[in-house]
Amino acid sequence: MLGQQFYHETIRKVVVAFGTMFNNIQVVRKDNTGKIVQSMKVPLAYGPRQKFLVRLAEDPDLSKQVAVSLPRIGFEIGGLSYDSARKLNRVQRFKKVKGANAKQLDSQYMPVPYNLELELYILAKNSDDALQIVEQILPYFQPDYSVTLNDIPEMDNKRDVPIILNSISYEDDYDGDFASRRSLIYTLNFTAKFYLYGPVTSSKVIKTVQVDQYTDIADNSPKREQRLTVTPNPTSADADDDFGFNETTAFYEDAKNYNPVTGNDE
């Protein structure tokens, strides 16, 4: 079982899809008359929030030439767990005919359900920026939002992945004197319900079934009496097509046997 190398990048696809949902959030700032004086796209990055908090503490004025600014959005993986409530039949398979001549059949066992915990954090230096970002996210989660992933391209397998918003927490670390830098942090906890897939195995497509029938099996050298051959109709049909069968019966008195290695009667 173990030892066969395969990698479908399923977890990576889920993480990328999750981050893509939040990569086009805008924040605007207005003057006292309501006129927009600044519009900016909120930066998005993958990584723990502690890294950015330490960066802000070391350089409160952000005077160093480092690409860190507020507001910004970050996200990271919080955990991975098996979801027994979505368990599928483990012996059932996906199948797909592959190749120009439809001579190859790819198959794969049913996937295994897992939950991916994700944390999204919003950092801002004033309340209005943070609330603008939060209000552009929350209306889409009631409490879930589904994205479609092409899990296994070679199997043409696409599946909807619901991303559920579990909780929202708020933190204001404005402590100390008036010279201290304030940072507002909203943390949104999500669960992505996805599936992990095993390896894809390939085999040839069976286009002909042949059965030789004997009248006396107890004999040390039984003689074949007839042969039943079944082929698809049309012979060019794929496994996913609507096709019938051709059945042919032949009778023999030559006492020969079919050799599957050479494909001849000997």
Image (cartoon, helix red, strand yellow):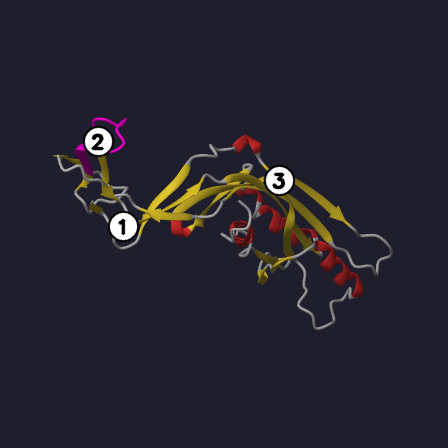
Q: Which residue is mark 2?
A: 213
Is label 1 in a helix, a strand or a loop? loop
Nearer to me, 188 or 228: 228
Mark in the foreground, 2 or 3: 2
Label 1, residues with CA under 10 Å away: few <14, some 14-19, many ≥20: some
Vertical placement of 67 versus 104: above or below? below
Nearer to me, 148 or 152: 152
**Residue found at x 41% / y 38%:** 93
Numbered circle sitting on residue 81:
3
| Image position, residue 178 (x, y; %) | 84, 58
| Image position, residue 69 (x, y; %) | 67, 63
**Residue found at x 79% / y 61%:** 57
Q: Earlier in the sequence, mark 3 or mark 1?
A: 3
Label 2, residues with CA under 10 Å away: few <14, some 14-19, many ≥20: some
182 horizontally vs 254: left or right? right
| Image position, residue 11 (x, y; %) | 55, 49
Asked which quadrant contains residue 252, the reply is top left
Q: Which residues are magenta?
A: 214-230
Nearer to me, 51 or 212: 212
Q: Hey, what amino acid is under mark 3?
A: Ser
Q: Hey, what amino acid is under mark 2?
A: Gln
**Residue found at x 63% / y 52%:** 75
Asked which quadrant contains residue 62, the reply is bottom right
Q: Earlier in the sequence, mark 2 or mark 1?
A: 1
CA distance separating discs 2 and 1? 30 Å
Whether residue 221 appears in magenta in the rendering, the answer is yes
| Marks 2,3: beta carbons within 8 A | no
Q: Which residue is mark 1?
A: 102
In this view, which residue lies farthest toward the front? 220
In this view, which residue lies farthest toward the right? 177
